[in-house]
């Protein structure tokens, strides 16, 4: 049963008395070509497992099952269980788990569901709800050390922020924090017309490749992250003002320190690279 067909999807939802729930950002992808492209982008070695976040009605899950050792599909909506079990009945390598993704220990759940003796390497593939995109991304990058890559569909504007360059209007805290943990790559734009129901915005698919270690070395990771947050909360202020206020030192003391590491005191936060911020924090921490 191909639930990528809008008519099949609507018929199945009617059969089970299901309707898309706005509170969980349920917009089901119904474009077979896009689904195939996403599955191909997620494809890894056949011996790897796949975690799918938000399987919906199983259209992408079917494709992932055909190219993975096993698929753990996690959804918050328990009402989808009956149609999903019908749609995925031919695939013995799919396990369903109904829970809030932000509360699931993905790696332990993989071990439990597939009866493994140790945490396996795996990829993540997801059409993630717009309202919890950022928490999901950071959960994957910070709490999933065995993840080889993630292919995530999200609101196009969020993707543009993630992939922005210094000086771009979209460049900011999200850009830098993801750069700290991973390489990223734009894969494709997905029109709002490819979904049922049709959302108000277009989407994009982004690939995340976690780094073995953070991209920059800092003396104190928490101070580094705190400074980034404050700097972009005060993004209209110069980096001299931001660093002086955050580190509680005079501007006359802060200015030569900035100049020593090649940062102009009158630059704004959106003009600085991740490496610039790392040098700044390390210098100010001594």
Image (cartoon, rainbow, N blue to C red):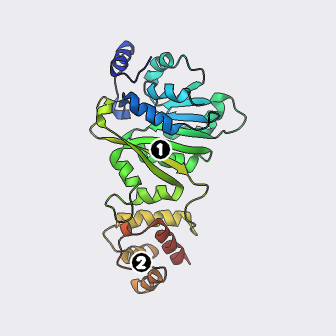
User: Which image quarter is the N terminus in?
Assistant: top left
In front: 2, or 98?
A: 2
Q: Position of residue 32 (x, y in %)?
A: 39, 28
Which residue appears at 44% of the width and 35% of the height?
37
Callout in the foreground (2, 1) = 1
Q: Are marks 2 and 1 in contact (CB under 8 Å)?
A: no
Query: Mark 2 vs mark 1: which is more N-terminal?
Result: 1
Q: Is residue 9 above or below residue 198?
A: above
Q: For this view, does 265 lie left or right of residue 144?
A: left
Which residue appears at 39% of the width and 61% of the height?
165
Q: Is residue 142 above or below residue 234?
A: above
User: Which image quarter is the C terminus in?
Assistant: bottom right
Which image quarter: residue 285?
Answer: bottom right
The secondary element bearing badge 2 is classed as helix
Which residue appears at 47% of the width and 44% of the height?
136
The secondary element bearing badge 1 is classed as helix
Label 1 Cα crowd, 10 Å radius (few <14 / some 14-19 / many 20+): some
Residue 244 tag number: 2
Q: Position of residue 10 (x, y in %)?
A: 34, 19
Q: Is residue 114 above or below residue 131?
A: above
Q: Is residue 188 above or below residue 3?
A: below
Camera sees residue 78: yes
Q: Position of residue 150 (x, y in %)?
A: 51, 43
Which residue appears at 29% of the width and 41% of the height?
201
In front: 241, or 54?
A: 54
Which image quarter: residue 50?
Answer: top right
Q: For this view, does 6 lie left or right of residue 279?
A: left
Q: Position of residue 272 (x, y in %)?
A: 41, 69
Label 2 Cα crowd, 10 Å radius (few <14 / some 14-19 / many 20+): some
Q: Which residue is mark 1?
A: 136
Extreme residue in the left direction: 200
Q: How many marks?
A: 2
């Amino acid at each position: 049963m191909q639930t990528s067909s809008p008519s099949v999807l609507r018929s199945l939802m009617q059969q089970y008395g299901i309707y898309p729930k706005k509170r969980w950002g349920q917009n089901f992808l119904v474009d077979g070509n896009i689904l195939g492209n996403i599955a191909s982008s997620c494809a890894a070695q056949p011996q790897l497992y796949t975690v799918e976040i938000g399987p919906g009605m199983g259209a992408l899950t079917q494709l992932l099952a055909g190219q993975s050792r096993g698929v753990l599909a996690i959804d918050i909506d328990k009402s989808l269980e009956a149609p999903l079990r019908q749609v995925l009945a031919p695939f013995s390598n799919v396990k369903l788990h109904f829970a809030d993704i932000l509360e699931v220990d993905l790696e332990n759940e993989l071990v439990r569901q597939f009866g493994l003796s140790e945490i396996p390497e795996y990829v993540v593939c997801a059409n993630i709800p717009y309202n919890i995109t950022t928490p999901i991304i950071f959960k994957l990058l910070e709490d999933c050390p065995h993840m080889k890559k993630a292919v995530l569909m999200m609101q196009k504007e969020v993707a543009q922020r993630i992939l922005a360059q210094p000086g771009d209007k979209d460049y900011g805290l999200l850009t830098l924090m993801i750069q700290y943990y991973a390489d990223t790559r734009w894969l494709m734009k997905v029109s709002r017309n490819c979904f049922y129901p049709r959302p108000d915005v277009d989407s994009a698919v982004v690939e995340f490749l976690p780094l073995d270690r953070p991209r920059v070395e800092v003396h104190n990771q928490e101070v580094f992250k705190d400074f980034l947050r404050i700097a972009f909360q005060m993004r209209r202020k110069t980096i001299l003002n931001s660093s002086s206020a955050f580190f509680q030192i005079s501007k006359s003391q802060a200015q030569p320190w900035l100049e020593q590491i090649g940062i102009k005191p009158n630059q704004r936060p959106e003009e600085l690279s991740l490496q610039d911020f790392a040098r700044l924090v390390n210098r100010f921490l001594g």
